[in-house]
Amino acid sequence: MIGLFKVKEKQREESQNTNRRGASTVKKQSAGELRLHKDISELNLPKSCKISFPNGKNDLMNFEVTIKPDEGYYMNGKFVFTFQVSNMYPHEAPKVKCKTKVYHPNIDLEGNVCLNILREDWKPVLNINTVIYGLFHLFTEPNYEDPLNHDAAAVLRDNPKLFENNVKRAMMGGYVGETSFPRCM
């Protein structure tokens, strides 16, 4: 235990000496950053999901996840989600948006995502891996009972075959009704 105190004391002295010389100090990580670093290092993603850091590895709090479903209505599509994680993580859920415009009952045309663990069911014991699996599950089992896109939900509920055709048309870069979708296959 004494060795630990000596290490901490030496780090404090080095920090003070660095400050006196006018050099910049190393930024102290918040609890949220530390937890996120742990979560990312322990990720166990399905092969159809990839994580990337468009701002570089120094900005762990903002990243992207690409999901390429290998089954279901959205098979062979490519959907990119942005994650913004606050310093209050894990006490606050990450903010997740879908960058890919998609015809989906649980994702609106602005990219907002309806996933219970991102809202009322968030708990600090949940992690980034859980959120990614939740997003993946939205593509294998879209839920018409808790929609953001009410039109897509109604079609899924009332006419699953038409829903499937609409999804394919949207993913190929076509129109569903008067809404155009970019190709995402």
Image (tube, helix red, strand yellow):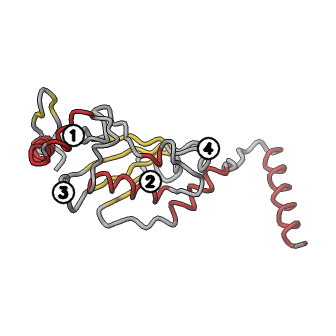
Q: At label 1, which amino acid type do we have?
A: Tyr
Q: Which residue is mark 1?
A: 103
Between tags 2 and 4, which lies in front?
2
Q: CA distance from mark 2 to mark 4?
A: 17 Å
Q: CA distance from mark 3 to mark 4?
A: 35 Å
55 with respect to 22 (left or right): left
Q: Nearer the viewer, residue 29 or 162?
A: 162
Q: Are circles 3 and 1 on residues that touch, CB within 8 Å?
A: no
Residue occupying image coordinates x 86% and y 55%: 13
Sequence-first tag of 2 and 4 = 4
Q: Residue furthest front?
A: 158
Q: Residue 131 — which label?
A: 2
Q: At label 3, which amino acid type do we have?
A: Met
Assign a secondary structure to mark 3. Answer: loop
With respect to residue 6, does 67 lie above or below? above
Residue 152, x across and y down, in percent: 21, 38
Between tags 4 and 1, which lies in front?
1
Q: At label 4, which amino acid type do we have?
A: Asn
**Quadrant of residue 104 in the image?**
top left
Q: CA distance from mark 2 to mark 1?
A: 20 Å
Q: Residue furthest top?
A: 178
With respect to residue 175, does 22 lie above or below? below
Assign a secondary structure to mark 4. Answer: loop
Q: Which residue is mark 4?
A: 87
Sequence-first tag of 2 and 1 = 1
Residue occupying image coordinates x 46% and y 60%: 129
Q: Residue 70 — which label?
A: none
Q: Which residue is mark 3?
A: 75
Label 1 CA crowd tier, 10 Å (few <14, some 14–19, many 20+):
many
